[in-house]
Amino acid sequence: MAEPTVRVSGTVLASLMFQHLNSDSDVEGLVLGEGRIEEQVTISDSQADHIHIEETYNVQKHIACHRLNTLYSSTGDLNMEAVQKMLVDNKRESVIGWYRQRRNTEQQMTLREKLIHENLKNVLSNPHMIFLLLTPSKVTPSGSTHRMEYSAFISRSRRFVNVPILITNLGLLEQLAYWKVSTSCSAAGYSLTMKKHGSRFFSSDGLLKEVKEVNSMNESLQVELQKSCRDVEESERLVEALQAEVSSLRRRLKEKQQKEATEEPEPVRSSDQRNVRLQESVSSLSCCPLFCSQTLNLQGFPLPDVSTATQVNADSPPANRNRKRPREEPMGGDRKRRRS
């Protein structure tokens, strides 16, 4: 049993959405592409041969009608002149179906659309026609967000079956998925232009000439990046070693300070030191003769201290004790007046 699938590129789907959102009414047109039926046979020793049939329709482009109801009449009959006018340079064999976009409706084919689809199959002699239905709707009342739903239908014995649609984007495909996707429809003028000017831009292996230069530049950049990474790694290891050394030195310094703090005696308080210094200053000043009390004579001169005089007499050699003390005369010729 064949399992039909429809493949649409992201570019074609975006073009359909853009065209519909920029129009004031519903849009319809023809779908061009290629249909392919592949038969895969799986051979194994445990069971009989298994045959799997894949029916794939690759949508490559679309042609929109300028106005509604130009492809068919009010009774659903197909207008071949309008179809030929729309195709222009494209072949009839490239038509694989048609599409319609209508707003705020359900994902179901109407009776009129089913009749037009059957007539299109008979006129173009293609029993494998597909029908694409796109129904956008507003999600928010302000119309800032829209939702686009799409589905594909194919008729089997006048019964329409919903066919899954696969969007061929780069991020969603496996490595060999693009081998099964056919190329887009190209005009003859495009092929001639590519043959004429392709040698100027493409190399012998089919790649752009600038691609090789970009690849070589990328390789050199990768080498420089790896070198920079190695330098950064070495510098980081050096920083880690220096940090470990600094931590060990700090730990040793802390241990040494703690050890010296336990061995040193308790320091004298600053107040006690100031008191001791004050006592020493006072005692030194008390020994100075200028700060001691002295005896003065009538003229106001200080007399020698008795203890000092006794010490001086004791140190001096013995003299004649009977010797009379010379009489002191008052200074300035003044003599003391005797009291009568």
Image: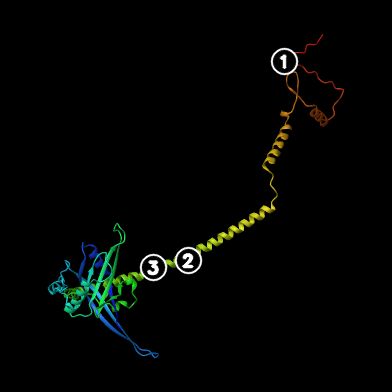
Q: Which residue is mark 1?
A: 332
Give the spatial CA distance, label 3 vs label 1.
113 Å
- The residue drawn where x is 34% and y is 72% is 172
- The residue drawn where x is 39% and y is 70% is 223
Does dot 1 land on a helix, a strand or a loop?
A: helix
Does dot 3 land on a helix, a strand or a loop?
A: helix
Q: Depth-wise, is mark 1 or mark 2 nearer the camera? A: 2
Task: Please provide percent x and percent y for residue 17.
Answer: 25, 66
Task: Please provide percent x and percent y for residue 12.
Answer: 25, 70
Q: Which residue is mark 2?
A: 234
- The residue drawn where x is 18% and y is 79% is 122
**Of the residues shown, which amino acid type is indicated by label 1?**
Gly
Q: Quadrant of residue 277?
A: top right
Which of the two residues, 127 or 241, is positioned nearer the viewer here? Answer: 127
Quick check: 92 left or right of 316? Answer: left
Image disc number at residue 224: 3
Task: Please provide percent x and percent y for residue 20.
Answer: 23, 65
Q: Earlier in the sequence, mark 3 or mark 1?
A: 3
Give the spatial CA distance, label 3 vs label 2.
16 Å
